[in-house]
Image: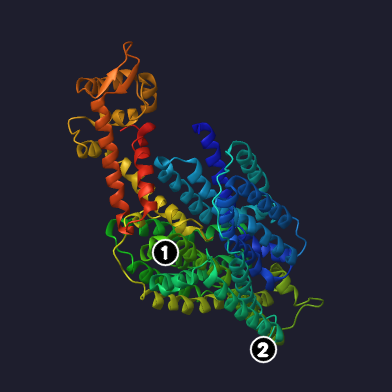
Amino acid sequence: MRQKGLGLIIIALMLGLLLASLDQTIVSTALPTIVSDLGGLEQLSWVVTGYMLASTVSTPLWGKLGDQYGRKRLFIAAIIIFLLGSALCGLSRNMGELIGFRSLQGLGGGGLMVLTQAIVGDVVSARERGRYQGFFGAVFAVSSIVGPLLGGLFVDHLSWHWVFYINLPLGAIALVVIASALPRDDTGTRHRIDYAGVVLLGSATSCLVLIATWGGTTYPWASPVIVGLALAAAGLVVAWIAVERRAAEPVLPLELFGVRAFAMSSAVGFVVGFAMFGALTYLPLFLQVVHGVSSTLSGVHLLPMMVGMLAMSVNSGLIISKTGKYRFLPIVGTAVATVGLFLLSGLTEHSSLLAMGACLLVLGIGLGMTMQVLVVVVQNAVDFKDLGVATSGATFFRSIGGAFGVATLGSVFTGTLNDDLRQVLARVRLPPGFDPAQVQRDPTVIRRLPPALTAQFLHVYADAIATVFRVSAPVMLGAFALSWFIPQTRLRETTKASDLGEGLGATATERSSLAEVERGLMRLADADLRKGYYERLGALAGLSGIPPQGVWVLARLNGKGWVGAGELAERAKVSRARGKPHVDRLVDEGLVERSEDGERLRLTPKGDRAALGLVRCSREGLSRLVADWGPDPQLKRLVDRVAPELLGAYADRPP
């Protein structure tokens, strides 16, 4: 594909991924304003939960349908669904409509998350894939940091509707570029799609989230609604287990739960998602209602948490790559996160914003030390055949943990707020004509009450939000206990190539086992190519007398017949005069010959043998990197395909 066309496609894909990942966090700082406009404080959690549930549960379907029917048409469908959901969210007239449309938006967002990274594998050559993976990992990092800030900016300077409307022009650009520039993919891969497994698992999860949301607040725990939901969830889980035992391609193979590393990492990941999204959802409410800061500033005050997460995610990956050790990171990380939540549980209406920022930084550091590592733990523990589904399973539980966290903590918040409000209303005199229900429908009315009454209600809100963290802290302590059961084993080479996107992205991935290994292999190869690769390769192939620039020329001429000298210089981004001494050396060694007019070059028989030696050494090096997965025909074919491609890796980056 021409570089210009590829550049447009990559920008469009990054834009689609940015929109989908941004919508997980951008809404948090807008929620207080949305509640004051639409009412329904007790339904606040579902604005976040609806999106996360829909995007997470739909992930396996998007991945397999894209393989089977072509990713281009599925990606276009995902953008259209996402944009339709965004437009309808902005037009919502009540919380019920907003929750429903957020779920529709999440359905499209799940497709954008999964298909974006799959399409990169289709359009980018193996030799450049490691570099582009880094770009897409950066998109997750940026969206995590700027999401709350952008949400606040839109609310303060436009309206909360623009949190959703902003997707429309950006998504339309991505749609036009993908529709016009992305080649059509007609090479379908047949799958036995586990539709029943997806529906049953999604339904069971939804029932459990509804129990966490309604139990003890909207309905008593012993009410027919809650009991009915519990029975339905149990029945759906039993049916799901029965279906998964017979499914040809189960959405989540049951035998994975027998792998201790997978079971423990999934449990810890569930709690990490629980804590992260619980904090992101309710802290803006604390800042805007209790401290009276603007929506924009509430996003600014969340930055310590997001920066702590990003910094430690990056550093955790570096530590793992250099030492091969990973077990201590989730242990320390969950301990630090527990301390952060415990500190946040002490927040009052008198707490300074500086102190709160310090608490959030501690929480972010703990989460960052844990999130990046859990995927590595799982990938390092399972066999090659289970690698893809185990990776998606680990991120699935983190995503579902986020949905449960927002729903459960929302129930805790609402229940505490109602109890505290009843106590306040029993002992104070309200202004004539004031409806106490307004405090729940629109928290901003608190600031318009007499000072003494305002102080009472601010204390109620501060206590309700602090209770959220008092519940979260012991839950995170449970994750700390579970993290001790994560085993430490020798780290596989391709697993060392940590991916920031997996650490920060909350939506489950869906890639094959081969794609997971190739992903790690390309990141390792990309790093290797920047560190004297051709010099080492030439030495291994018995060409120690040839400088790396000459080895590069041999690699570029391999199997190509006559190649224009000017074209070769242009690919190397050097002048012909600068490259001529290296070609002269190859001609003198009998490895390359020039045409009579001196304008073209090709390998001699001796040069052909030398170039084949380079390919052989490249193949042997890649084989060593994947050897710890054990023998597998797919891995051998991967190495055979990638090795020649990597020898042209400096086509645009000369040594």
Colour option used = rainbow
Quadrant, the C terminus: top left
Q: Within the image, what quadrant is residue 61 found in?
A: bottom right
Front in this rendered view, residue 581 or 593:
593
* In the image, farthest residue toward the right: 433
SS of the residue at dot 1? helix
**Residue 366 position (above or below residue 548):** below
Q: Quadrant of residue 468?
A: bottom right
* Residue 19 horizontal side relative to residue 574, left or right: right
Report the amino acid beneath label 1: Ile
Near-viewer residue (206 or 358): 206
Q: Secondary structure at mark 2?
A: loop
> Where's residue 644, x and y in %?
35, 38
Q: Position of residue 289 (x, y in %)?
A: 63, 68
Image location of residue 418, percent across then percent down: 67, 81
Three-letter code for the amino acid on which mark 2 is drawn: Ala
